[in-house]
Image: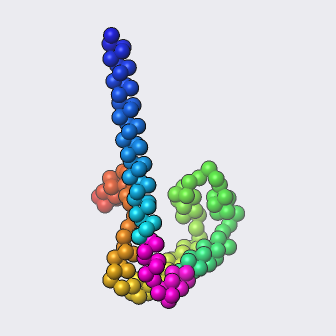
């Protein structure tokens, strides 16, 4: 009798967990759909000049990436091409191998991108700026709160 009650409890918890996961997945789909709609509205509200600014930012980011990759050593190329590492793992491994020139290049690229971004944001109306802020808002991942608190304590 105890075994059957235990099995029923396990079955019940399993079903409860699966239903909660399916609700989470539906919520995620709805969130993505809403964000896609917001992005579409935002892009439609942009002037041709603003669209050109965004395209220039994309091109600049691509050029910066290519320029940095052109300076990679064999060791750095091996890290980038390692499919066993996640994106974060590659970043951490690369960061420790960057030369001073590469670090300076990354810094100057970051400043250039920041300048272009601020120019673009300055050209937006209040309504566009509000939509842009909603689009750029990143969803927190589980556990990221506690990690940020730990870093803040240091």
Asked if residue 36 can be seen in this view, the reply is yes
Q: Is residue 87 left or right of residue 6?
A: right
Hey, which quadrant is residue 19 in on the image? Answer: top left
What percent of the width, then of the height, locates residue 112? 50, 83
Q: Residue at x 34, y 76 (%)?
A: 130
Hey, which quadrant is residue 30 in on the image? Answer: bottom left
Q: Which residues are magenta?
A: 39-56
Is 133 or 96 nearer to us in this picture? Answer: 133
Q: Is residue 110 above or below residue 88?
A: below
Look at the image and say whether residue 44 sits in the magenta stretch.
Answer: yes
Q: Is residue 152 above or below residue 7?
A: below
- The mark total stands at 0
Q: Residue at x 44, y 61 (%)?
A: 33
Quadrant that contains the N terminus = top left
Is 101 or 143 nearer to us in this picture? Answer: 143
Asked if residue 96 can be seen in this view, the reply is no
Is 100 or 53 nearer to us in this picture? Answer: 53
Residue that extends furthest to the top in the rendered view of this protein: 1
Look at the image and say whether residue 152 sits in the magenta stretch.
Answer: no
Residue that extends furthest to the right in the rendered view of this protein: 74
What percent of the width, then of the height, locates residue 7? 38, 20
Q: Residue at x 40, y 59 (%)?
A: 31
Quadrant that contains the C terminus = bottom left
Q: Main secondary structure of the magenta part?
A: helix
Q: Residue at x 34, y 80 (%)?
A: 127
Q: How is the image coloured?
A: rainbow
Q: Is residue 22 above or below residue 32?
A: above
């Amino acid at each position: 009798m105890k075994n059957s009650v235990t099995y029923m409890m396990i079955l019940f918890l399993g079903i409860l967990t699966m239903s909660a996961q399916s609700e989470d997945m539906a919520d995620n789909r709805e969130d993505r759909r809403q964000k896609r709609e917001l992005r579409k509205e935002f892009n439609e509200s942009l002037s041709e000049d603003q669209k050109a600014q965004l395209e220039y930012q994309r091109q600049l980011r691509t050029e910066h990436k290519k320029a940095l990759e052109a300076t990679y050593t064999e060791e750095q190329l091996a890290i980038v091409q390692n499919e066993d590492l996640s994106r974060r793992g590659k970043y951490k491994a690369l960061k420790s191998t960057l030369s001073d020139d590469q670090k300076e290049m990354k810094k100057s690229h970051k400043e250039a991108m920041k300048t272009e971004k601020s120019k673009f944001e300055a050209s937006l109306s209040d309504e566009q700026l509000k939509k842009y802020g909603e689009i750029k808002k990143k969803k927190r991942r589980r556990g990221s709160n506690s990690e940020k608190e730990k870093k803040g304590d240091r």
